[in-house]
Image (cartoon, rainbow, N blue to C red):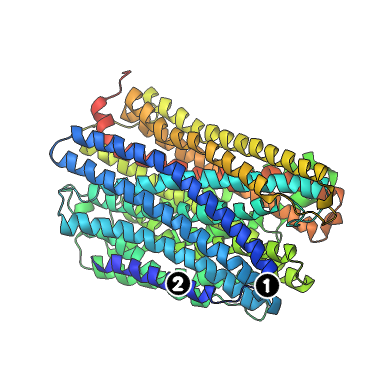
Amino acid sequence: MILTPLAAIVALIAAFILAKSVLKAPTGDAKMNDIADAVKEGANAYMNRQYTTITYVAVAIIVAFAAIAFTQEGNAATTWWWTTIGFAVGALFSALSGYAGMTIAVRSNIRVAEAAKTGLPGALKLAFNGGAVSGLAVAGLALLGVAGFFYLFNNVLMLADPVNPLVGFAFGSCLISLFARVGGGIYTKAADVGADLVGKVEAGIPEDDPRNPAVIADNVGDNVGDCAGMGADLFETYAVTVIGALLLGYLLPDAQVVTAFVTYPLFLGAFALMASIVSVFFVRMGKSNNIMNALYKGMYASAIISIAGFAWITHAIFGNLDFAELAHLTNAPTSWLHLFYSTLVGIVVVIGLIHITEYYTSTKYSPVRKIAKSSETGSATNIISGLAVGMESTLYPTIVLVLALFLSFTFAGIYGIAIAAVAMLSVTGMIIAMDTYGPITDNAGGIAEMSNLPESVRENTDALDAVGNTTKAVTKGYAIGSAALAALVLFADYILNLEKAGYTDAFVLNDPIVLVGLFIGAMLPFLFSSYLMESVGKAAGAVIEEVRRQFREMPGIMKGETRPDYGSCVDIVTKSALKEMVIPGLLAVFAPLIVGFLFGPLALGGLLIGVIASGLMMALMMSNGGGAWDNAKKYIEDGNHGGKGSDAHAAAVVGDTVGDPYKDTAGPSINPLIKVINTVALIFATLIATSGGWLL
């Protein structure tokens, strides 16, 4: 069992070595360094203030958990104390994963801009390696936390229940991820929308033009939103998925003992992490100079190596095992092959979701081009078309997930669904690398623009950045799909925990109490998203007014004679993001508690189903629709439908500003919302079952 945390440590060492190689690359001239330093300082300042604010919330929860632990006795008290400690460590590790993603990104961007002077292949490799540092660090930290705690609970402390306290670690990681996603999303999109509407539409200046007072805030936002936010998001996805599978393997056998079904997900995660390390070396540009294909090489290498390892591990653990202990499942596995087939389902889901998302968000395909075409007749038709594409984009991912649920359940019952979800983690390192690659190349283009580097350099950074828009979209598709499967596993854990607590009432959808929870749960993603969209709108409005003020009162800015006051815009979005991120986080924590204690555990079960189903559709629609709007604008800027400065371009910019908070604020934040609600339900399942519902 010690081999699993050791694998995580190896990944962290590999990330450190890769980071040193990235940081050895040259950083360019003094002007480039001035711009990069401004972005780095702004990102660090925001992250420090964000995590200071989050710490207050985390401390309050730790105190509440400790108070509950004091009221418990025996094994229940032990479980609550270790749940409290797990929450604190999960929150800490999640924060570290966010810092890891951002820290290397704000140091890689200038190096990529400098490397772009000599061509695409070197700049691509440097940008991807910068992202890979984040990928290996995040996955390594997640596996180290889960496996390390499990080893401590099971092998060192030998707790009577070594698995349930892990849910505290999951909750801590989810909560920090939610705040990071919400705060970073509000920051980045308020700055982006403000910069685009005044800079591009009103002043007619290019993106990343140094005359735009919001340009530094915009570049900072790319890092705190996409790098830090996605790092924390996929950290908690990794942790929650593995913990959900561990808990399911622990609760399913009648004896509630640690069996191979508990440790199996950890071994899968460890091998997949080693596959990610090897796969970094497969990313290289071929003769066709196709950047996306170069990135996909790493993802496919990770998937193929993982498949081979999963077959070996599954046979080694279950080859001679009697599956009788899972015979009470509707579809219990009868051989090791059935579990292996479930891992294949998970990997196929990853590939399917990534290519479906690319279809809906890439300039190569008809959905984006339809939006671009509709821009010729104005902003209204652009927005109508973008909404239609976003809604349509829920179809095929849903089909893929439904087939995955059916097949994995057919192979190995509920446990098979959990294993399919764990298998999706096989490409987590590559997914985070591809996501972080996007902000790195975006910032590199900004540095090239603001430093007045030769047009050939900007052409190279633009080529890298164009692919970055697609990578950010496809990684969101992966995050949403993995979140959905992980949440379903957590729901199964919740129902089993109720059964172990002696609550044997049937959970049926025609029960009015279940429907009460179902409707509330279906509503929560809409209320949550509404708050975030409004928050972005208010903050963006303040940025717009500030940029207009500077253009009006300092005419030398447009002539290039006066340096804009970048700091004022950075300060506006920082304050707005920190202020607005607290209420959504509290909503996620208190909604399941209020419903559970007022209406009972069956209503809470209905809420979980409602929030999973509604949240999945909302997240897909927002992320894909927003990505399509963004790339429709890029497609027009490439010279189609009139190009830059045309009426179609102005309409596409408006559509993109609507899509920005869709794809980078509300949509991605729904993932941690779903899992925070599910982990809170799991932690309080026994107490809620005991209460029975205060209103009933």
**Local crowd at mark 2 within 10 Å, few (<14), some, or many (≥20)?**
some
Label placed on residue 197: none
What label sits on residue 304 in the rendered view?
Answer: 2
Q: Which quadrant does the N terminus fall into?
A: bottom left
- Who's the residue at 77% across and 51% down the image? 372
Indicate the position of residue 248 as horizontal and vertical percent values.
Answer: 28, 49
Outermost left residue: 74
Query: Mark 1 sits on what residue?
Result: 29
User: From what the image shows, is residue 143 above or below residue 286?
Assistant: above
From the viewer's side, name the closer residue of 44 and 653: 44
Residue drawn 32% across and 46% down?
A: 87
Q: Is residue 467 visible?
A: no
As measured in the structure, the alpha-carbon distance from the residue carrying label 2 to the one carrying label 1 is 42 Å
Give the amino acid type for the residue marked by disc 1 in the picture.
Asp
Front of the two marks 2 and 1: 1
Kindly state the secondary structure of the residue where label 2 is placed: helix
Q: Amino acid at mark 2?
A: Ile
Residue at 28% x, 43% y is 84
Q: Position of residue 658 (x, y in %)?
A: 69, 42
Question: What x and y, as percent, mark residue 300?
Answer: 51, 70
